[in-house]
Amino acid sequence: MAKKSGAARGGTPAVAALEAAGVAHTVHAYEHDPRSDLGYGLEAAHAIGVDPARVFKTLLAVADGALVVGVVPVSGQLNLKALAHAVGAKKAVMAEPAAAERATGYVVGGISPLGQRQRLRTVVDDSALEHETVLVSGGRRGLDLSLAPGDLVALTGAVVAPIGQGARR
């Protein structure tokens, strides 16, 4: 059963998508510090008190001209060559932040793989399956959602592939 969040606990398209699907999840709100030099994902891991290997960032790239989503641990980086391979493209480059914001409806630092304005091809790093639950952005800075990795894959229609690099496994 999905945990009810209401506007005070989330109120984003990502939360609404989880609730509409009846997916069990937990909403983690924290005070985002715009002065933090950790990066959004590591800041979330520390603020919530979870292992950074369980917190995943949502990154957008352009693979052979099409926007695609890569979901990788915040403790590592996105391997663009592996992402391109996972979607059958020859090459991938990081998307411009403005293009990512337009396509998803979220601001950089709060882009969620859930409830995006446009449904984009999504690839989730295979390390997500090593955890009972993973955390992803809830659709705004200072809001993360924990859910089972299988539910994340199912809701986004994602492919699972080894697209992360440098993350602790």
Image: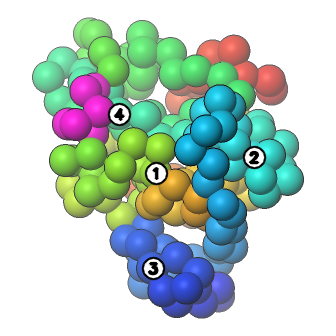
Please determine whether, in this image, residue 20 is positioned above or below residue 45: below
Q: Which residue is mark 3?
A: 11
Q: CA distance from mark 4 to mark 3?
A: 23 Å
Q: Which residue is mark 2?
A: 45
Q: Residue at x 65, y 68 (%)?
A: 29
Residue 58 visible in the current orientation = yes
Please determine whether, in this image, residue 78 is positioned above or below residue 55: above
Front tag of 2 and 4: 2
The amino acid pointed to by label 2 is: Ala
- Mark 3, Cα crowd under 10 Å, few <14 / some 14-19 / many 20+, is some
> For this rendering, which residue is in front, 112 or 9?
9
- Mark 1, Cα crowd under 10 Å, few <14 / some 14-19 / many 20+, is many
**Does residue 61 appear left or right of residue 160 in this picture?**
left
SS for dot 4: strand
SS for dot 1: loop
Q: Which residues are magenta?
A: 95-100
